[in-house]
Image (cartoon, rainbow, N blue to C red):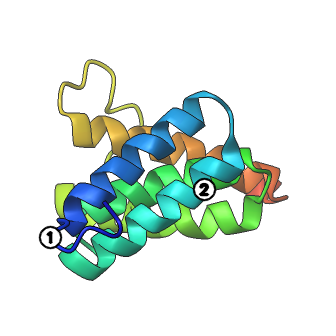
């Protein structure tokens, strides 16, 4: 896909995103980070940096970065992803995702919990009630 002259960049981004998810499930953080990084770059270039699809890929990049023990970097990535997803879908209140049926709202709640873990791992113990 990368070298084909008629390649659709969004199809490549989707393939890289899927590859990143596979690496993530296999706990291959470095490979997941590489795939998600490229997917985010392509989505930023084609859809824009604040598009929900870009934010979704960025959120998975943040999770993979966290699992690669790069906590400060993961915190920054997840904060940007959370901001962009909230801009697209509205903020999530604490505990709102109980019985939640909307995928994006569920993703936001998950990101809030992941961000809490990242911040604690990065030494921000004072934000446990974040």
Is residue 46 in view from this perspective? yes
Q: Residue at x 60, y 56 (%)?
A: 33
Residue 84 location, x and y as percent?
32, 67
Quarter the N terminus occupies:
bottom left
What's the distance in space between the residues labelled 1 and 2, CA to CA? Answer: 26 Å
Which mark, by number, is residue 60?
Answer: none
* Kind of element beneath mark 1: loop
- Judged left or right of residue 73, residue 79 is left
Q: Name which quarter of the figure residue 100 lies in.
A: top left
Q: Which residue is mark 1?
A: 6
Residue 24 location, x and y as percent?
58, 37
Q: Residues within 10 Å of mark 2 (few under 14, many from 20)?
A: many
Nearer the N terminus, badge 1 or badge 2? Answer: 1
Q: Which residue is mark 2?
A: 33
* Kind of element beneath mark 2: helix
Marks 1 and 2: which is nearer the front? 1
């Amino acid at each position: 896909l990368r070298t084909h002259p008629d390649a659709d960049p969004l199809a490549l981004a989707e393939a890289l995103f899927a590859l990143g998810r596979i690496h993530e499930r296999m706990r291959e953080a470095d490979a997941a980070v590489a795939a998600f990084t490229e997917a985010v770059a392509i989505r930023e270039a084609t859809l824009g940096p604040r598009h929900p699809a870009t934010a979704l890929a960025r959120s998975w990049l943040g999770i993979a970065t966290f699992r690669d023990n790069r906590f400060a970097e993961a915190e920054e990535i997840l904060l940007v992803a959370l901001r962009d997803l909230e801009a697209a879908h509205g903020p999530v209140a604490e505990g709102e995702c109980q019985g939640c049926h909307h995928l994006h709202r569920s993703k936001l709640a998950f990101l809030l919990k992941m961000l809490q873990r990242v911040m604690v791992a990065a030494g921000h113990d004072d934000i446990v009630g974040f």
